[in-house]
């Protein structure tokens, strides 16, 4: 199966820089053996959709609203995202959980609204350092899986992706050992299978770069990567998608 490589640009680039990076990516990355998903901010999604039309690049949003339409000032509907050609949507990234206070009910509602709009949610889960050191990682992950997937059904396994992102590894330059990621991914896949009856993709995120990506992608149960900082550099990102 093709590995899925997701670029999460967060809010790191201004509008002009995003436009430049979109064009550069299209120019520099022609053929890859992986599925690529670029997630710029909302403002750049529409132009990225035009630029990437007819290429191998897929687009993802970094969030979406809890419903298709209504009085929700400042929110963006998953239906509108679908209309402009967006395929994926990141949900429950830890920066949204922690900095913006998103709780598990909200995350669950967003997954439901994304699925209803036929977007593929990329659900982010992960433990923090204290939880890891206390040996609670699996318990925390299980709690996050159960809360996020409550009442959810998917028709085919490709309709949902889980991103395992240990919080202590995000943006720190310190990633998990690839073999350990594989063990945790196996655990996540088994637990999700119990809930949904499907063998979904699990990608790894947290300080991925061109020096460690190969080792991660070699692991059987690492179905891809969610790349933050290293996805902002075309050279770095193209070597990740091409290895
Ligand atoms: P990082 O970010 O690759 O910069 O650690 C990953 C993420 O937050 O998705």
Image (spheres, rainbow, N blue to C red):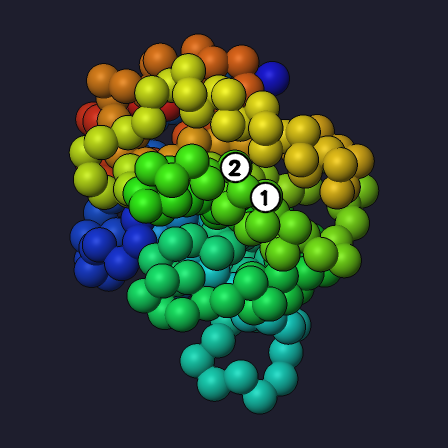
Distance from disc 1 to disc 2, alpha carbons, whole Å, reads 6 Å
Residue at the image position 47 percent from the left and 14 percent from the top: 219
Residue 73: x percent and y percent? Answer: 47, 85
User: Does residue 9 appear in the picture of this structure?
Assistant: yes
Q: Is residue 171 left or right of residue 69?
A: left
Q: Tell me the crowding category of disc 2: few under 14, some 14 to 19, or many 20 or more residues within 10 angstroms, Cα based.
A: some
For label 1, the SS is helix
Residue 96 appears left or right of 123: left
Which one is nearer the viewer's eye here, 178 or 86?
A: 178
Query: Which quarter of the rendering shows the N terminus?
Result: top right
Q: Residue at x 62, y 84 (%)?
A: 70
Classify residue 106 by image quadrant.
Answer: bottom right
Above or below, 169 against 28 in this view is below
Q: Are marks 1 and 2 in contact (CB under 8 Å)?
A: yes
Front-lying residue, 30 or 223: 223
Give the residue pinned by disc 2.
Answer: 138
* Local secondary structure at mark 2: helix
Q: Position of residue 171 (x, y in %)?
A: 23, 42
Taking the view exactly as shown, the residue that stands out farthest to the front is 134
Given residues 165 and 43, the one toward you in this image is 165
- On the question of residue 50 being in view, the answer is no
| Residue depicted at 50% across the width and 71% down the height | 76
Q: Which mark is residue 108?
A: none
Q: Which residue is mark 1?
A: 142
């Amino acid at each position: 199966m093709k590995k899925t490589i997701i670029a999460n640009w967060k809010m790191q680039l201004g509008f002009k820089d995003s436009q430049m990076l979109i064009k550069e990516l299209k120019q520099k990355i022609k053929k890859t053996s992986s599925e690529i998903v670029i997630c710029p901010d909302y403002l750049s999604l529409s132009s990225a959709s035009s630029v990437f039309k007819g290429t191998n690049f897929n687009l993802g949003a970094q969030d979406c609203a809890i419903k298709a339409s209504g009085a929700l000032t400042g929110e963006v509907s998953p239906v509108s995202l679908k209309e402009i050609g967006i395929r994926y949507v990141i949900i429950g990234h830890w920066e949204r959980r922690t900095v913006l206070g998103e709780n598990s009910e909200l995350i669950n509602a967003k997954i439901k609204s994304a699925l209803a709009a036929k977007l593929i949610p990329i659900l982010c889960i992960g433990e923090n350092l204290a939880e890891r050191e206390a040996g609670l990682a699996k318990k925390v992950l299980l709690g996050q899986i159960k809360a996020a997937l409550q009442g959810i059904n998917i028709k085919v396994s490709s309709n949902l992706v889980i991103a395992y992102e240990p919080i202590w590894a995000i943006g720190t330059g310190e990633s998990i050992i690839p073999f350990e990621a594989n063990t945790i991914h196996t655990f996540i896949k088994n637990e999700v299978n119990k809930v949904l009856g499907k063998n979904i993709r699990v990608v790894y995120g947290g300080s991925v770069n061109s020096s460690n990506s190969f080792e991660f992608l070699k692991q059987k149960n690492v179905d891809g990567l969610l790349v933050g900082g290293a996805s902002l550099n075309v050279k770095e990102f193209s070597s990740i998608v091409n290895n």
